Image (cartoon, grey):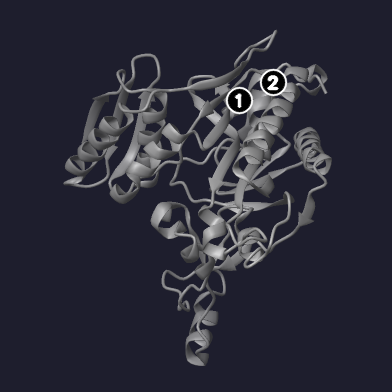
Amino acid sequence: MTRTFDLSHVGAPGVQAILDGLRVDGENVRRHDLDAETGTLTVEFARRGAAEHVEAFVAQMTRMHRRIARKVLVEQHAADLTLLDVDAALLSHPDVYVLGDGLIGLRGALLDLFRFFERTFRGFAGDYLAEEEHYPVMVPAELLAEIGYFGHFPQQVTFCSHLRGDLPALEAFGQTAADRVPEHVPLAPPGHVLSPAVCLPCYRQQQGAVVHGTRVLTMQNHVFRYEGSSFRPLRRAWDFTVRDIVFFSDYAELVRLRQEVMDRTIRLCRELDLEVTIEVASDPFFLDANRDKAIYQRMGEVKYELLFPVANRSPIAASSFNLHRDYYTSVYNTHRADGSLVESACIGFGLERWVYGFIAQKGLDRSRWPI
């Protein structure tokens, strides 16, 4: 059974939020396609009774996002712009290895391009004399609970576990798993998760710390966010790489620093002749309790995103520029000498997304790259 929805009257943020929600709703949605020209969304349902649920979700998200107007802060236009649909070419490219759903390996020219952006954004952090941090990709699940992550983004979490310490169960598993993964695996309760954001451990690391002036940290790591079945090489992955720069300071200084990093990022795009925008953004919230927070994020302009236009699809966000206010520092009592809470901001650069945005405009022929 299929149903069509007219989204032509819904702004780009609302359309993206609807698509993000449908992407993770695999129990109810088998497939969905958006005709970008007409704004017609076609949804194929996965089970009987799913239509009512999906219709209610689309209606609720549409009502919410009618209250939110798109706001473009910066437009950087390329002198020579051709938007290329590179998805099919990436799947067959010799420098791309698809290991599994959302799991991509790189080599050759594409790995060189990845390393170029890696060095560039590490250089951004170095200019602020940022302290380099390194964390495991696996973190205790309680860390996410402390900051309310499970209530905000439960659909993204990848839990980690291990086989139960039960000798008969281990023996039985070893016999059945000799040449295949058994349907039923005797797992212990998951006490850990693969980190869904690079910077999360750094806020706990500052628990009880006293910040004098401005403190700057930087870290790069793998990030894991499950986003349903819509994985695409470089554009949407389960396992991807992010460089973060985290600032602890007062609000006015954080606003200034965020603007400074945004300006530098736009200069980089100008040097590479890339077409991008920086826009007011919000994270995709699908739970009723969090919908007002999405409106707060956009109205308060606490989250900005750098977007690459993409052929035949919605733009992709490759960087975010976020003011947290005292959201994290209040949890961990990170404060000034006078006892007042310090505030934090985080700038994130998704390396695979930058590679994708670049080749979607400059193509896969390395000889034509302006680097």
Q: In this view, does 127 lie to the left or right of 45?
A: right
Q: Nearer the viewer, residue 348 or 192?
A: 348
Local SS, label 1: loop
Whether residue 139 is visible: yes
Amino acid type for the residue under numbered disc 2: Gly
Q: In this view, does 181 lie above or below 104?
A: below
Task: Identify residue for label 2.
Answer: 363
Quarter of the image for the C terminus: give it. top right
Q: In this view, does 78 lie to the left or right of 164?
A: right
Amino acid type for the residue under numbered disc 1: Val
Task: Identify residue for label 1.
Answer: 86
For the point 36% across and 30% down, the residue is 14
Judge the density around disc 1: few (<14), some (14-19), many (≥20) Cα neighbours within 10 Å.
Answer: some
- Residue 293 rendering spot, x and y as whole percentages: 38, 44
For the point 78% across and 42% down, the residue is 125
For the point 79% across and 39% down, the residue is 115
> Looking at the image, is mark 2 or mark 1 earlier in the sequence?
1
- Residue 235 rendering spot, x and y as whole percentages: 58, 35
Q: Nearer the viewer, residue 40 or 335?
A: 335
Local SS, label 2: loop
Q: Are marks 2 and 1 in contact (CB under 8 Å)?
A: yes
